[in-house]
Amino acid sequence: MTHLDSLLSQQISLALSSLFTLDIKPESIVFQKTNIEFKGDITLVVFPYTKATKKSPEETAKLIGEYLKNSVPDVEDYNVVKGFLNLVIASPFWLGFLKEILPLDAYGFKKKGSSGRTIMLEYSSPNTNKPLHLGHIRNNLLGSSVASILEANGNKVIRANLVNDRGVHICKSMLAWKLYGNGETPESTSMKGDHLVGKYYVEYEKHFAPQWKANLADWNAGKTDKLNPKELEKLHTLLKNLEIASEKKKDRAQDELTDFAKELTPLMQQTKEMLRNWEAGDPETIALWKKMNDWVYAGFAQTYKALGVTFDKMYYESETYLLGKKIVEEGLTKGVFLRREDGSVWIDLTQDGLDLKILLRSDGTSVYMTQDVGTAAERFREFPELSQLIYTVGNEQDYHFKVLFLILSKLGYTQAKNCYHLSYGMVDLPEGKMKSREGTVVDADDLMQEMIDTARAMTLELGKVDDFTPEEAESLYRQIGMAALKYFILKVDPRKRMVFDPKESIDFNGNTGPFIQYTHARIQSLLRNAKTKGLNHEGNDLDPGKITLLPVEKDLIKAIYNYPDVIRQAGVEYNPGVIANYVFDLTQHFSTFYQSTPILKEENQELLIFRLKLSRMIAQIIRNSMTLLGIEVPERM
RNA sequence: GAUCUCGUAGCUCAGCUGGAUAGAGCAGCUGCCUUCUAAGCAGCAGGUCGCGCGUUCGAAUCGCGCCGGGAUCACCA
């Protein structure tokens, strides 16, 4: 609620009371933007009150309008269309407001920490067996931007990254490198470390597939002589299941058989052995693990730097994967969990409309959920002041987090209600889902490079950098390319699945990051030109009495007026798209103004200076908004 | 089978705590660079808001049902 809203709602409450003896609380009165077709700045819909006023909507609106015009100096005029009361707010109000905020350099932002809330926001959370791809880009950009938005709302934010650095999938890359790597290193191959490790993850699959397929083929041909009696028995059970399975369950039964075939390959046996060695602390395995993970981290560091994301706190699964077991034991004694005959531990969530969920395997080892319970508990202990714990994770894990928060709550963690799953939709390509098997996965590093290369080509073609030094030009290409990418992804509501069309994302016209950057650069150019002409726009003085606002100028000030609410809204929704849409709209309005209204050529000196100040304020908002999206704005382009 | 989610212009998306004739961008078509950066501006064209029923003075927005896409429900992570 803005100052204007609260002033008007109080007056309207008084009006309703004195005109119709109606008791309506000011807080319950809401306004909406005046439709562009009609005159006015803010609109009250009176339909809700007509039952009580016993008058027609038009009559009711007219009476309220007249009351406001007489009692509120800032209400200059009003008009009524059906049940809509459109109020015209006087120019001095808008100019007075602008004058008030001109001295601020972060208008709309709350001071960091002013809310007294500390929020931990987890994002990125990569696996160390392959490089980052397009999906990770959305995760990183989203998490990073939401962190900034929450800070702009006055919160202290801890940016956390939980690295998935252990497990079967990591051992696959390690084993493949050991078996087929011939000692390759990032140095010897001039490959980025994460890409080299990813190469061996793929290599593993290449050797693995023929092995399990051979198992299936053998079994189909009745060759089962390699199996021990126990395995043979399981195979018979699986085959029988497949045979009697209904049409619908056939896939599932086939998957189970395939899993068993994978299990019994030499490669998988070796992988599992490697994982056991790792868990036992075998020095050779640990050394290999460290070496390859270091390669990956060096690679990730580059990618993160290029993306412009940072972290305050790193967590490694290798250090946290044992957490949670103790909590599960405690939960057992509390009766939250139950132990089956085979020793596995479960929670029954059927009362909550969910299913049974496993927390410890029959061999006593943890599953993902166990670790997540453990890390959450650890974070609550480590940061007792935490007001909120946010997980930026794809919506494929909606169920997982529902269960996690429920378990935490059942274990008695009151902080469970402060946990939030920032769930975002998958990124698809125009031809459908990204599939590693079909090689359609878009690599993060490649994509960024492509964007920068395109920015270079476009900029050179337009002849924009003729007077730039080579370093300045390169920096500009990077800024533009990254802006295109980031804006393209962040403008979409995070909750929604989105389509990433490389051709479209590389467009620099229209609703794009580069267009917004360009508008900022134009304003800066304007201000530079003003300076060389000796025009001083830096002061904050402004005489509302001497300026008559054009409609386009009033629209701009109104948009500025709404900015704090936009930042608040983006924070409430955890949605950078709110900022993106706002700043595009603002930029578009400014372009209209810029194109249609003389600024430096204005003869009236008061007006000229006012327009410069207005432009300066718009530039500030563009810059600060883009910062919330993690996007840089150049001074020239 | 169960649960969750999405469906708005040819394409990508806004709008969804109910409000006026549903908005942008891209793609298509017209204009505008001796004038503050044309990565721009102005305009034209493009819609049964998946379908149906209901609630309401009023529904793209809320509820129910159906159709279609996606996801999840593993001793995977």
Image: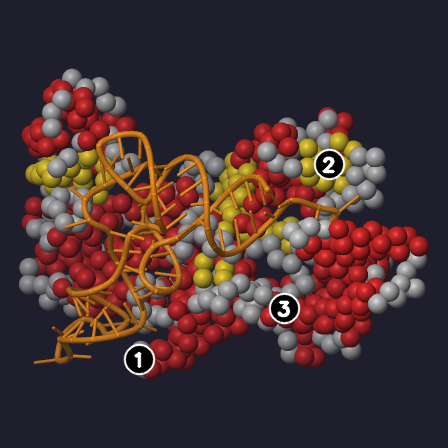
Marks 1/2: CA–CA distance: 64 Å
Q: Amino acid at mark 1?
A: Leu
Where residue A432 appears, as percent x and y from the top left, is 50, 64
The disc placed on residue A386 is none
Q: Nearer the viewer, mark 1 or mark 2?
A: 2
Q: Any mark on residue A462, and which?
A: 1
Chain under disc 3: A
State yes or no: discs 1 and 2 in contact (Cβ < 8 Å): no
**Residue found 68% across the figure and 37% down from its top:** A356
User: Circle 3 is placed at which residue position?
Assistant: A437
Q: Nearer the viewer, residue A16 or A222?
A: A222
Asked if both marks, 2 and 3, belong to the same chain, the answer given is yes
Quarter the C terminus of chain A occupies: bottom left
Residue A175's place in the image compared with A275, above or below, is below
Element type where label 3 sits in the image: helix
Q: Which element type, helix, strand or loop, lies under badge 1?
A: loop
Image side of residue A296 versus residue A87, left or right: right
Please determine whether, in this image, residue A553 is positioned above or below residue B53: below
Q: Nearer the viewer, residue A82 or A554?
A: A82
The part of the image, by quadrant, that contains residue A214 is bottom right
Q: Quadrant of residue A294?
A: bottom right
Instruction: Check disc 2 and report the residue beneath it.
Output: A346
Q: Is residue B56 above or below residue A157?
A: above
* First along the sequence among labels 3 and 1: 3
Q: Amino acid at mark 3?
A: Arg
Disc 1: host chain: A
Residue A46 horizontal side relative to residue A367, left or right: left
Q: Answer yes or no: do the residues labelled 3 and 1 have beta carbons within 8 Å? A: no
Badge 3 and badge 1 both on one subunit: yes
User: Which residue does the image show at 68% across and 43% down from the upper left?
Assistant: A369
Q: With A592 as the anchor, is A71 left or right in this view?
A: left
**Res. A159 in view:** no
